[in-house]
Image (cartoon, helix red, strand yellow):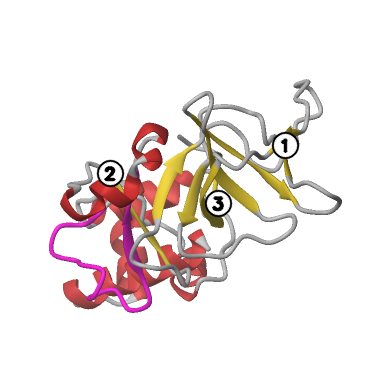
Amino acid sequence: MEKSMISIILKRLMFEHGIKPMELARRTKVPQPTVHRIVSGNCQNPHQGSLAALAQYFNISVAQLKGFEPIPGITTESVQGLKKIPIISFQEAAVWPTIMDDYKPIHTLFTEGNVSAKAFALLLNDNAMFPLFSEGSKIVIDPEKTPKNRSYVLVLIHNQQNVIFRQLITEGEKPYLKSLSPDLQFQPLFLKEQDRILGVLTEARKSYDE
């Protein structure tokens, strides 16, 4: 997902600055084939140096170029196909429906995913779901999405008042939450009536240069 967002945002910036890929390559000293691949969305893992040079030319950060942070003057509506959602804490996720209308996010990210207006993002704070989701990954959660067997879900554990991210298993008599980590000894956690599924994973990202 990230590569196409870079492509869309970069195209928008080039349009607003009236610059073509060939000229952008010349001015940034990024090889023209590299610029072309990034603009077309065919570069799966752009080199950090190339992204830094492109971001510097447009006077933005690499995080903004990737869509992790907003760009002043470029709204969700002006970047076709993207939606801007807030990055919140696990504690805020527990009460999200009650605070979302007045919430003023410090950090946001752009997503192409088909998510509802209630969607939010989190920064994973442990390795319970490693290796598929490692600590530091950004996950997009949609409270309006219906959980299914083997969905990845965010859950409020009532008796601990703790919010955790796990895989939901509904096979058998009673649904339970499963950790993926082979290194951490997590026992299956059976859901109780008081526990509440806060939302379902729609997208996950990991930035290896952060």
The residue sitting at 24% across, 46% down in the picture is 99
User: Would you say residue 29 is visible in this rendering?
Assistant: no
Which residue is identified by label 2? 107
Which mark, by number, is residue 162?
Answer: none
Q: What crowding class fits label 2: few (fewer than 14 Cα within 10 Å), some (14-19), or many (20 or more)?
A: few
Which mark, by number, is residue 204?
Answer: 3
Placement of the C terminus among the 4 image quadrants: top left
* Side of 201 relative to 61 (left or right): right
- Is residue 74 inside the magenta stretch? yes
Which residue type does callout 2 highlight?
His
Confirm or deny contact between disc 3 and disc 2 (CB under 8 A).
Answer: no
First-in-chain label (3 vs 2): 2
Q: Residue 43: name its quadrant.
A: bottom right
User: Would you say residue 198 is visible in this rendering?
Assistant: yes
* Side of 138 relative to 109 (left or right): right
Residue 80 at x, y percent in the picture: 32, 79
When the figure is inspected, residue 54 is found, relative to residue 132, above or below; the finding is below
Which residue type does callout 1 highlight?
Phe
The residue sitting at 14% across, 58% down in the picture is 72
> Viewer-nearest of labels 2 and 1?
1
Which residue type does callout 3 highlight?
Ala
- Is residue 135 inside the magenta stretch? no
Magenta-colored span: 70-87
